[in-house]
Image (spheres, grey):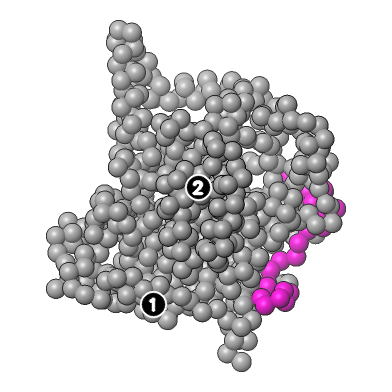
Amino acid sequence: MRRFAILLTVFAAAPLAICQDRIEVRGPQLLTMKELVALSDTAAPVGKLRRKREALLRTPFVGLQNEGSTPRRPVVESLGPVLRVAAWNIQTGTEFDLIRLAFTDPGRLARVVAKLNAAAPGEDRADPKDLAGFRPQANHLMQSDVVLLNEVDLGMPRSGYRNIARDLALATGMNYAYGIEFIEVDKIHLGLEQVRAPGEEDEDPEEFAKRHAVDKSRYKGLHGTAILSRYPIVRATNVRLKNCYDWYGKEKYYINNPVEKGRRRTAAAAFLERVGREVRHGNRFALIADLAVPESPTGKVTVVAAHLENKCRPGCRREQMEELLTHLRRVRNPLILGGDLNTTGTDVAPTSITREIRKRVRNPNFWATQGIQWFSPLAFGSVMLGSVNYVKNYRDPTAASIPLIAVNRDSRLFDRVEDFRFADGGSFDFSGHPGRSANGRDGSLANSNERASKGFKPTFEFKRDYKGLLGQMRLDWLFVKPAVNARRPPFQFAPWYGRTLEHLNESTPEQMSDHHPITVDLPLRTDPVRKGVPAVSHRDARASALRENYK
């Protein structure tokens, strides 16, 4: 009776219930192929089609294991049992079989990795250091009790028409929530057009047609974000964020713009990155789930899986984050916010000649640079200034921004997250005590996100990154609000040992994803196992907290 009552509470607004194997799934109705084709012809559907579209975009699917799910609670020295949280942009789930093994069977994955590398040409094989480090990272990832996943497909040809979130939940024995970010209605995806993206011009016609063939009986056209959890999911909601890019109208316009075509061809040639057309309904959002965690002072932990816009200026991403934080202000539970925040530090919105001129005329940094060039012989000052700023910001979107001289366009997003205060007085832990970081490094956010000798360990790399000099970025993040304790700096649910699992992801000739998974450990105990463990603090108490340990 108790479980039945919980299910009624969780899914009261969800119209569809399906029992699939060991998991009961609630969520909105899927669109038919006829309805998807109709959506491909309009940005503003009406009537029943509009209602079904809105239900998909606003109501998450939630699946609970019929036999329950048991948290693993890995034990870490000095901390005791922890809640391990992972975040991973899995690039639609095209390498589903490898990703599934990474979460379920590191031993079998090791054998598969060995075979793949043995069959690959010498220049395509994984680096020996990646192969040496991948097994412990796979074991580490498998112990995660909560997993945030971006770019998760449902019924798409590129990922074998799988329901990726449900299939991973079944494989791992976890509960899941899945929110729809986009409904993919590009006529290319629907099999109604064949348009070659930059980098595809020379592909064999038969191979091209085969790769773009569509099974219309299996096509569902959904793409979104998922949360997997070994703890019960009490509630799940979607929060739509500010629309920074019109994925339906602008995508159709810019794909035919000569300047944007040139930029995409350059990306394909310089970095081996193919940027295709993606006509969609929907926009960026965050999936929020409350989990029943007995050790929490409130009985729950809130998990937020966010995906911010990439095709926009950094300022719009900051506005998306501010909107999300406002929605979360009254949350009293320990909270983890993570996912792909697309913190590139640059304006990567599609472009045109008019937009490029307007961007420069209105940009004070452009005129400051022009002044330096005017008064500096051979533009030496401008070159030096640009080089220094590039090094300062490289792989560190949290670096300070100096207006007009050394700008970091993403720094304000991190400043906003660091300064944010919840209604209960809690805040995100930005501390960086070397005793709490995975590799002994300090600096802001070092305890929840692994730092490197310069900036942070990148979570995204272009296929060609010129030996690390270009094309490496920190796009994926984990922010943690610990349990609030009015009497002392918090320990319970504070971030420890944030890691980037690059060796796991790079262990195969073709990476499992274009993003690396990241993890963080949150102690479930209220006190450390032994004395002398570095204290945790919010920013306001950081100076004193880093000087003192628990007595």
Q: Earlier in the sequence, mark 1 or mark 2?
A: 1
For residue 74, what is the image quadrant? Answer: bottom left
Residue 225 quadrant? bottom right
Quick check: 32 above or below 143? above
Q: Is residue 167 visible?
A: yes
Q: Amino acid at mark 2?
A: Glu
Q: Position of residue 42 (x, y in %)?
A: 77, 44
- The percent position of residue 348, horizontal first and vertical second, equals 52, 34
Q: Is residue 481 visible?
A: no
Q: Is there CB contact under 8 Å for labels 1 and 2?
A: no
Given residues 96 and 56, the one toward you in this image is 96
Q: Which residues are magenta?
A: 17-43
User: Which residue shows up at 47% across the image and 43% down it?
Assistant: 127
User: Which residue is situated farthest in the front direction here?
Assistant: 118
Asked whether 346 or 359 is in front, the reply is 346
* Residue receiving disc 2: 506
| Quarter of the figure with the C terminus | bottom left
- For the N terminus, the quadrant is bottom right
| Whole-percent x, y for residue 20 in the image | 72, 74
The one nearer the camera, 392 or 500, is 500
Q: Where 436 falls versus 462 (above or below)?
A: below
Instruction: Measure the alpha-carbon separation of dots 1 and 2.
Output: 36 Å
Compared across the picture, whether 442 is left or right of 409 comes to left
Q: Secondary structure at mark 1?
A: loop
Give the SS element for disc 2.
loop
Q: Mark number for residue 296?
A: 1
Say what amino acid the circle numbered 1 marks: Ser
Answer whether residue 274 is magenta in the image.
no
Q: Residue 370, position in %: x, y? A: 37, 15
Q: Residue drawn at (46%, 75%), measured in percent from left and top?
A: 72
